[in-house]
Image (spheres, grey):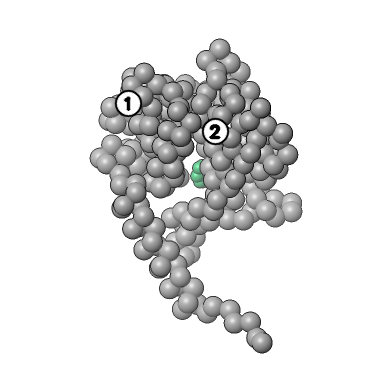
Amino acid sequence: MSLSLPGDEQLRKNAQMRAVIKRELQTRFAPEDDALRSSITRAQAAGVPLIQISPLQGKLLQVLALTCGARKILEIGALAGYSGTWLARALPADGKLISLEVSSKHAEVARATFAAAGVSERTEVRVGSALDLLPTLMPEAPFDLIFIDADKKGYPQYLDWAVRLSRVGSLIVADNVIREGRAFQTPPPDENAAGAAAYTAKLLEHPRLVSVAFPIVTDGLSEDGEAMDGIAISVVRD
Ligand code: DHB
Ligand code: MG
């Protein structure tokens, strides 16, 4: 029996179908309001890279935050405040999101986004390199949820800090762990892929983490308009 592989026409149809499904899921489960949309136009105007998470990932973060009863959330990498807005909206009124950002320009944009979303009171953007800022957070720990979405090279060290800043039952979530599959190549072909690969390896051998990862099809700039990346979710146990 011969194996029949899909031709170009079929691949195009499959990609179209994924795009339709994604749009329908997004419309039903994760509609963006003006504040979220404004985060993207603000980012664009300020020259912040348009590499924010998808609306469905944002909604996933909210479901996860509510699942672990999050009152304190830490984000590593604020960018323009898009993911931070989804996260902050899952907090109770007296909850707190601390978002670390290395670029003071991005931090300003993120603060403007939080103001537009009406979550300024429960959010704080701290500017600096994450590896400098993370040790200073120990007095504010434990965090209920930690979302890692910064430079991929730093991911393995961010994971160490995330565990230190957690409690049993905290969730640690990381964006970009697949990198179009480059994180699975041996050796990984670039330093971002290497960081993601080291992160995943560390998760899987960590005695206190129970983890899962999912592929996420993003609206990338690749020729077919899609890019495959992924998200890892870990829960901290005893
Ligand atoms: C890049 C970073 C991200 O966090 C992301 O979601 C996509 C791309 C990047 O640095 O290229
Ligand atoms: Mg990302």
Numbered tag placed on residue 101 in the rendering: none
Taking depth in this image into account, of 150 and 171 the one nearest to the observer is 171
Residue at which label 1 appears: 119
Query: What is the spatial separation of the Cα atoms under label 2 and label 1, in whole angstroms?
Result: 22 Å
Is residue 24 toward the left or the right of residue 64 in the image? left
Taking depth in this image into account, of 209 and 151 the one nearest to the observer is 209
Residue at which label 2 appears: 171
The amino acid type, in three-letter code, at marker 1 is Val
Residue most extreme to the left = 34
Q: Position of residue 39 (x, y in %)?
A: 33, 38
Query: Which of the two labelled residues, at mark 2 and mark 1, occupies the earlier sequence position?
Result: 1
Residue most extreme to the top = 139
Location of the C terminus (image quadrant): top right
Give the total number of marks visible in the rendering: 2
Q: Position of residue 66 (x, y in %)?
A: 42, 33
Q: Position of residue 188 (x, y in %)?
A: 69, 51
Is residue 57 toward the left or the right of residue 236 in the image? left
Q: Secondary structure at mark 2?
A: strand
Would you place residue 53 above or below residue 164 in this image?
A: below
